[in-house]
Image (cartoon, grey):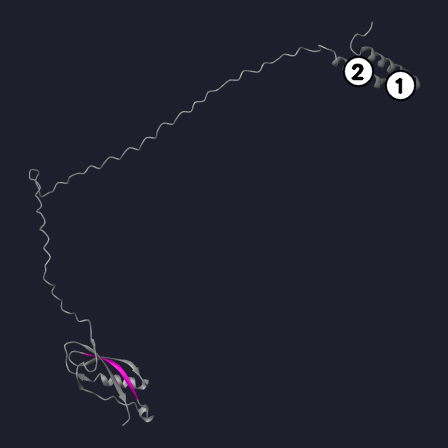
Amino acid sequence: MSDTRPGGPIRSERARRELEQAERWFAADAGQRRVITRALVAALALHATVLIAHMPNWGPAPVRVDKPAEQSMKVQFLKPPPAKAPPKPPEPVKKKIPRPDLTPDEPEPVKPAPPPPPEPSTAPPTPEPAQNTGPVRVSPGQGPGLIKKVEPQYPPIARTAHITGSVVVDAVIRKDGTVSDVTVLSSTNKMFEQACIDAVRQWRFTPGPQDVVLTVTVNFTLK
């Protein structure tokens, strides 16, 4: 019986040559024979597997699986409801407080209309009297006249050392002519200042309508 499958005679001839070569190997050595037998069995099993894999119509026929139909999904977007405006707070109710001096039957008295504003006067304003804000400074020729003058005591040290000088002061003269305060403005030597103050406080001037400030100079000279 001949092999009608494609490649059948060629595969059988190859298998025959391999069997003849294997018989020659078996006849050479008994130990090697066992190894060759195992290799031959493995080769035959491999050839059988390849032949079975190349057989046509082997196994169940493939079944075609149709692609499932695509399902469309319809999406609809809904608009949110409009926001409601917050409710307005209720207006407070104004309660009318009854007056205790009126009875329920008596009406509330009508308030008289305010008088009209006075018309502006065309007369010049009356000048206000000048307020006394303190002593007024005057010059030596315009101030009150000197009635009593006391010479200052010469400091003994200055007299011994033959030192001369002068002191300029501001004297506050009251309306009655007395001197209330003396302030030193300048001096040529400090030792003359206190003697000048003590002397000017004893001076007297003519009375006047108000307090004045007068600048005077006291000289210290040796006679």
Where is residue 198 drawn, in percent x and y? 24, 84
Dominant secondary structure (helix, strand or loop) of the stretch shown in magenta: strand
Where is residue 211 drawn, in percent x and y? 18, 77
Q: Earlier in the sequence, mark 1 or mark 2?
A: 1
Relative to residue 164, is residue 32 depicted above or below? above
- For mark 1, does the 10 Å Cα neighbourhood hold few (<14), some (14 to 19), or many (20 or more) residues? some
Q: Residue furthest right?
A: 28
Q: Secondary structure at mark 1?
A: helix
Where is residue 11 drawn, in percent x and y? 82, 13
Q: Report the quarter where the N terminus lies.
A: top right
Residue 90 image-quadrant placement: top left
Q: Residue furthest left?
A: 106
Q: Residue at x 84, y 19 (%)?
A: 39
Q: Which residues are magenta?
A: 165-173
Q: Residue furthest top?
A: 1
Where is residue 194 drawn, in percent x and y? 28, 84
Residue 136 image-quadrant placement: bottom left
**Is 176 on the left or on the right of 68, as rendered?**
left
Q: Residue at x 86, y 19 (%)?
A: 36
Relative to residue 14, is residue 81 depicted above or below? below
Q: CA distance from mark 1 to mark 2?
A: 21 Å
**Residue 33 lies in the magenta-colored region:** no
Q: Secondary structure at mark 2?
A: helix
Disc 2 marks a residue whose amino acid type is: His
Q: Residue furthest front?
A: 122
Q: Mark 1 highlights which residue? A: 33
Relative to residue 163, is residue 185 depicted above or below? above
Q: Report the quarter where the C terminus lies.
A: bottom left
Q: 131 or 22, which lies in front?
A: 131
Disc 1 marks a residue whose amino acid type is: Arg
Q: Residue at x 77, y 15 (%)?
A: 50
Res. 47 mark: 2
